[in-house]
Image: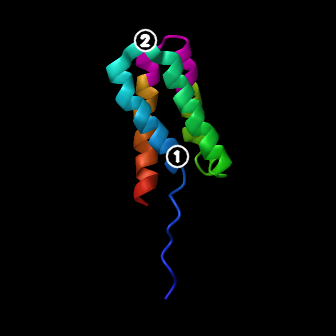
């Protein structure tokens, strides 16, 4: 019998980062958009450091776009993208 695979699922760090930002985005709004964009970029960097970026490329692109939108003050669009990326990453976490 093979040992269980205890590695995190592909995109786990990105999923955690998006989930954190979504929770704070509704509470903080535009006031701390720069900090939230930094949190998303940190999640992207952690994902890249683990070598997961290539496994969740479309979600990385979406999160990168959402971070850019937050910096431009387009919170509604960033929120919509993050909701979709969260859903896609959550599906990957269940596999």
Callout 2–callout 1 Cβ contact below 8 Å? no
Magenta stretch prevailing secondary structure: helix
- Which percent across, then down, holds residue 94? 40, 57
**Residue drawn at the location 38% of the way across and 26% of the way down:** 24
- Which percent across, then down, holds residue 78? 47, 22
Q: Relative to 84, does residue 67 appear above or below in the rendering? A: above
68 vs 29, left or right, is right
53 vs 27, left or right, is right
Residue marked by disc 1: 13
Residue marked by disc 2: 31
- Which percent across, then down, holds residue 31? 43, 11
| Quarter of the picture holding the C terminus | bottom left
**Local crowd size for mark 2, using a 10 Å CA cut-off: few (<14), some (14–19), many (≥20):** few
Residue 72 magenta-highlighted: yes
| The residue positioned farthest toward the bottom in the image shown | 1
**Residue drawn at the location 41% of the way across and 38% of the way down:** 19
Quarter of the rendering containing residue 38: top right
**Local crowd size for mark 1, using a 10 Å CA cut-off: few (<14), some (14–19), many (≥20):** many
**Residue drawn at the location 62% of the way across and 51% of the way down:** 52
**Residue drawn at the location 49% of the way across and 24% of the way down:** 36
Residue 29 magenta-highlighted: no
Image: magenta residue range:
66-78
What's the distance in space between the residues labelled 2 and 1, CA to CA? 25 Å
Q: Relative to 20, does residue 6 appear above or below in the rendering? A: below
């Amino acid at each position: 019998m093979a040992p269980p695979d205890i590695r995190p699922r592909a995109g786990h760090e990105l999923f955690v980062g998006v989930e954190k930002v979504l929770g704070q985005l509704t509470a903080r709004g535009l006031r701390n958009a720069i900090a939230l964009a930094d949190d998303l970029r940190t999640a992207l960097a952690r994902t890249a450091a683990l070598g997961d970026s290539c496994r969740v490329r479309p979600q990385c692109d979406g999160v990168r776009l959402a971070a850019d939108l937050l910096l431009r003050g387009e919170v509604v669009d960033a929120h919509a993208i993050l909701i979709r990326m969260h859903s896609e990453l959550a599906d990957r976490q269940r596999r």
